[in-house]
Amino acid sequence: QITLKESGPTLVKPTETLTLTCTFSGFSLSTFALGVGWIRQPPGKALEWLGVIFWNDDKHYDPSLKSRLTFTKDTSKNQVVLTLTNLDPVDTATYYCARRLISGGYHRLDYWGQGTLVTVSS
Amino acid sequence: DIQLTQSPSFLSASVGDRVTITCRASQGISSYLAWYQQIPGKAPKLLIYAASTLQSGVPSRFSGSGSGTEFTLTISSLQPEDFATYYCQQLIAYPWTFGQGTKVEIK
């Protein structure tokens, strides 16, 4: 059974740094071709792709956030960590992690965490 | 970035209706498109990938088609549990952008 779960603070102040952890089970990020993606959703708005980290530690970030966003993985703990610096109220959103699978050359996000709402406010 | 435009943004339909949602890409993306369903308060759920491949466990009333720049998601007979927001996503080029969503509500 594959599960993912996001954890971290629910309220952070502007200019602070957000650290979220995605803890997963049922797969290993040391497995060839697997990845974990991050997606966020501001309240009442559409999904926004933040980026992805792969089994080989390759990473891709949304260009608009690239200077503030970092992904790291701890394969032994089955965790991926998202760090977002210099927070602004517009970063208020539900943050999701999801497993990225590829087959036949086609990517998809096939299992998602439940999401965690992060509010940026003083 | 590749832009995805979904139409309509909102539709009202009845149980049993056939529903079609369109996703247009700003440039050709071959078949590198996925569709997700999001019920309010829940995480998105993968329905279709590679434009037309049904994800395991997804009911066969859902189908996807298209290639290049125009794609459709069809629900052949709308069920009560299908009232949700649907998103397309392109996965051919970074950033893997999403459409703005189509909300399907009960008429």
Image: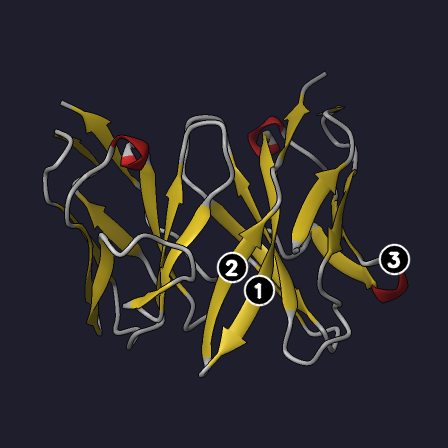
**Colour scheme:** secondary structure
Q: Tell me which residue sits at (56%, 31%) in the image.
A: A90
Tag 2: Cα neighbours inside 10 Å, few (<14), some, or many (≥20)?
many
Q: Quadrant for the N terminus of chain A, please.
A: bottom right
* Picture coordinates of residue B98, whole percent (x, y): 39, 52
To which residue does mark 1 refer? Answer: A100
Could one spot residue B100 in this view of the protein?
no
Please, what secondary structure does the residue beneath circle 2 have? strand
Q: Mark 2 is on which residue type?
A: Leu
Answer with left or right where residue A40 lies relative to residue A22.
Answer: left
* Discs 1, 2 touching: Cβ within 8 Å: yes
Please, what secondary structure does the residue beneath circle 3 have? helix
Q: Quadrant for the C terminus of chain A, please.
A: top right
Front residue (pair B38, A2) = A2
Q: Residue furthest top?
A: A122
Do the residues marked 1 and 2 share a common chain? Answer: yes
Tag 3: Cα neighbours inside 10 Å, few (<14), some, or many (≥20)?
few
On what subunit does the disc labeled 1 rest? Answer: A
Q: Tell me which residue sits at (43%, 68%) in the image.
A: B91
The numbered mark, 1 or 2, whose residue comes first in the sequence reads: 1
Front residue (pair B82, A41) = B82
Could one spot residue B71 in this view of the protein?
yes
The numbered mark, 2 or 3, whose residue comes first in the sequence reads: 3
Front residue (pair B72, A86) = B72
* Picture coordinates of residue B17, whole percent (x, y): 10, 38
Q: Mark 1 is on which residue type?
A: Arg
The numbered mark, 1 or 3, whose residue comes first in the sequence reads: 3
Q: CA distance from mark 1 to mark 2?
A: 5 Å
What numbered label is drawn on residue A77?
Answer: 3
Q: Mark 3 is on which residue type?
A: Lys
To which residue does mark 2 refer? Answer: A109
